[in-house]
Image: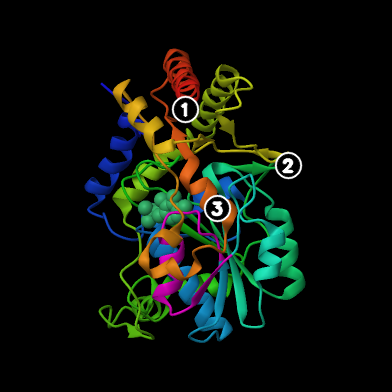
Amino acid sequence: MDIEVFRPRYEIEECLTEIRECLTEGWTGAGFKTSQFEEAWKFYTHLPNALFVNSATSGLHLAVKALKDRRGWHQGDEVVSTPLTFVSTNHALLYEGLAVRFADVDDSLCLDPDSVESTITPRTKAVMYVGMGGNSGRLDEIIAICASKGLDLILDAAHLAGTRVNGEHIGPGASVVVFSFQAVKNLPTADSGMVCFTNPSDDEYARKLSWMGINKDTYARTQGKGSYKWMYEVESVGYKYHGNSIMAAIGLAQLRYLDRDNAYRRQLARWYDDALGPSQRVVKIPITVGCESSRHLYPVLVDNRDEVVLALNSAGIAPGVHYRTNTDYPMYSYGAGKCPVAEDMSRRLLSLPMHLGLGFDEISYVASTLVSITERRSVHV
Ligand SMILES: *Cc1c(COP(=O)(O)O)cnc(C)c1O
């Protein structure tokens, strides 16, 4: 079987125990396990609020929509973002009619603070930052820029479950942090995510939006009186974005192992580091000093990437590419040519297999195969 880039691994018995509780209780929807998981996530990250949603994509949309409504942003107001990401990041901004202004990345694959600063205009309302592969990049500088200019900071933390910076879980300093618990992410469910606002009233607003705009407080009040239990108020045109108890059940079980699993991912990364050695043809991505990365990805840069991928495929290795620059896609093509570093990386990036089913032997095989492919190629060229 091929060595795949990702493969989720579940604590099956513990997941089933948690799921069985939902089925026994007759409660699979929002509430019950979703509340337990929100509490557990706040305890784990030390972030003040947590709203469990059905995906990070929904969560990013909810985050953007809540900030836009509550801050009074208008159609066409700008958000500075990265072109080197999964399209969810930027689609969330387009859903709300905001203008995506691309800044370039640095050698961490994350936004370059200097480029962000020069991309900000009087219409800029926020910065959207992605911690690529688990790396924090220069997030501290981005936080300082946003603070000094009065901009909101949205952190797409899809790769950052368990990433710590100077011993503290990443997230403080952003207006909102959005995690993904999609199956191939570090805390796998099937599909779900968590939205963590700094401000409790942003959380409260988004919570209503996540369930059709229904005001659950009113519902709770009427329920308390013992009559009109069916009654609720609808305050806005919300969405069906909340998470369910089956996903939360899996999340609760998996969360117990997140630190252990991320530590193993860092071990895999060290094995790659050693096995790739100082090869000039396989360029590693530096992890920021002070960052204990979740190591969602192990990205490298190689020349002739597409041919290298085909050669790896022939050797039974199926790497990934995270990501193509979003300016390759029609809705973002207006940004082509503006982010030369991201565009160059987009052509050279490769994500080596990184998951809990791998061991030293597979890592050694992938690394030595990659090194020999790139060396062979450079001899022929
Ligand atoms: C996976 C991912 C998302 C979307 O997460 P879902 O939970 O699948 O919606 C968003 N941004 C980045 C950077 C991702 O990797």
Tag nearer the camera, 1 or 3: 1
**Label 3 CA crowd tier, 10 Å (few <14, some 14–19, many 20+):** many
Q: How crowded is mark 1: few (under 14 residues within 10 Å), some or many (20 or more)?
A: few
Number of numbered tags placed on the structure image = 3
Residue wearing tag 3: 342
Judge the density around disc 2: few (<14), some (14-19), many (≥20) Cα neighbours within 10 Å: few
Q: Name the residue under label 1.
A: 381
Residue 230 in view in this figure: yes
- The residue tagged 2 is 166
Q: N-terminal of the two: label 1 or label 3?
A: 3
The residue under label 2 is which amino acid type? Asn
Q: Nearer the viewer, residue 23 or 8?
A: 8
Mark 2 or mark 1, earlier in chain? 2
Label 1 sits on what residue type? Val
Q: Distance between the residues labelled 1 and 3?
A: 25 Å
Q: Position of residue 249 (x, y in %)?
A: 35, 45
Side of 345 where 221 appears, left or right: left
At 34% from the left and 72% from the top, the residue drawn is: 211
Q: In this view, does 157 lie to the left or right of 55?
A: right
Q: Which amino acid does label 3 sit on?
A: Ala
Residue 142 in view here: no
- Coordinates of residue 81 in the picture (x, y in percent): 55, 64
Tell me whether the residue at label 2 lies in contact with that at label 3, contact meaning CB atoms closer than 8 angstroms: no
Quick check: 349 above or below 332? Answer: above
Residues drawn in magenta: 81-102
> What residue sits 56% from the left and 72% below the top?
79
SS class, disc 2: loop
**Percent coordinates x, y for residue 169 in the rendering:** 63, 46
User: How far apart are the alpha carbons under marks 2 and 1?
Assistant: 44 Å
Q: Where is residue 54 in the image (x, y as percent from the top left)?
A: 34, 58
